[in-house]
Image (cartoon, helix red, strand yellow):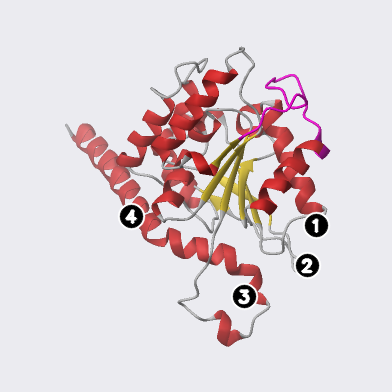
Amino acid sequence: MDILFAVFIVVSSYFILIKCIYNRCRSSFAKSCKHLMTFLSCREKSPLDSQASDFAVDVRALIVTAHPDDECMFFAPIILRLVEMKIPVQLLCLSKGNFYNQGSYRQEELYESCGVLGLPASNICILDHKELPDSPKVEWNTSLTSSLILKHITEHSINMVLTFDGRGVSGHANHTAIHKAVSYLASAGKLRDDCRVLSLLTVGMLRKYLSFLDIPISWLLPSQLCCIIGSQGYQQAKVSLGPCYVTAPNSCGFVTCTFCSRATCLSTHSTSSHKNQNVKIY
């Protein structure tokens, strides 16, 4: 009986901790986002200006993905949170996902999925370039990929880009190609000075499938921007992948997006001389 009671106390405490972390994250997300977007500019302002607590930030976000279903399988939490904050979010998908010759169907499914996540069709761009095929064996050309991404960034005056990291979360060659392209844009100084580029952090298999149980672990790691969704967001993310993607080869990856987005700052390109800022999104 004592053992069962101890287990009950531990489990209850763990779930209370998760709830506290969620509430704190919800209340601090906007402030953290503002800090991220103004970090560089504030360092160049006078102390009086940088201490202004009501400084408004105009965020225009772009999610760059490789295939239909990437947006809900990997980026659903951050999309839902940004939309909830009424921040304009653009989605650039670099292929129709035609690996199984179902590109036309998957394209329509992407629009349905984004509708569930709160993104209007006018904010979605799906490319179908012959040099960017949906294939885990094809390494997309960095020059071509970066030029297409830069064009979209410029046309929509984007100042926050979110995409995959160097391991591509799932290791897909098209995912890592996007990371290389955006890394090139940042390192070559082709992005606007105020543009922040975040890459989704690839984690180990165990943590990937812990879902919301991983929240306290992630919370303990250094971060400046934290994004966690609750039960309502979970249901939206679930619907955006489930019924919307009937052609998806499998939906086992859905659990990787549930509740948390984990990302690290790829670059905070600036003409100033200070070092890049490290940022994570949980």
Check the image and report above or below for 145 versus 50.
above
In this rendered view, identify the residue nearer to me: 217 or 85.
85
- Occupied quadrant, residue 96: top right
Disc 1 and disc 2 in contact, CB within 8 angstroms: yes
Amino acid type, mark 2:
Thr
Q: Is residue 266 visible?
A: no
Q: Which residue is mark 4?
A: 23
Residues under labels 1 and 2: Cα distance?
8 Å
Camera-side residue of 71 and 94: 94
Q: Quadrant of residue 193?
A: bottom right
- Residue sitting at x 55%, y 46%: 90
Gap between marks 2 and 4 measured at Cα? 37 Å
Q: Are marks 3 and 1 in contact (CB under 8 Å)?
A: no
Residue farthest to the top, as pictured: 100
Q: Which residue is mark 2?
A: 271
Where does label 3 land, which residue? 42
* Nearer mark to the viewer, of 1 and 4: 1
Magenta residues span 126-143
**Label 2 packing within 10 angstroms: few (<14), some (14-19), many (20+):** few
Q: CA distance from mark 4 to mark 3?
A: 28 Å
Q: Residues within 10 Å of mark 3 (few under 14, many from 20)?
A: some
Location of the N terminus (image quadrant): top left
Task: Check disc 1 and report the residue beneath it.
Answer: 189
In space, the residues marked 3 and 1 are separated at their CA atoms by: 20 Å
Picture coordinates of residue 132, whole percent (x, y):
74, 27
Asked whether the viewer can see residue 176, the reply is yes
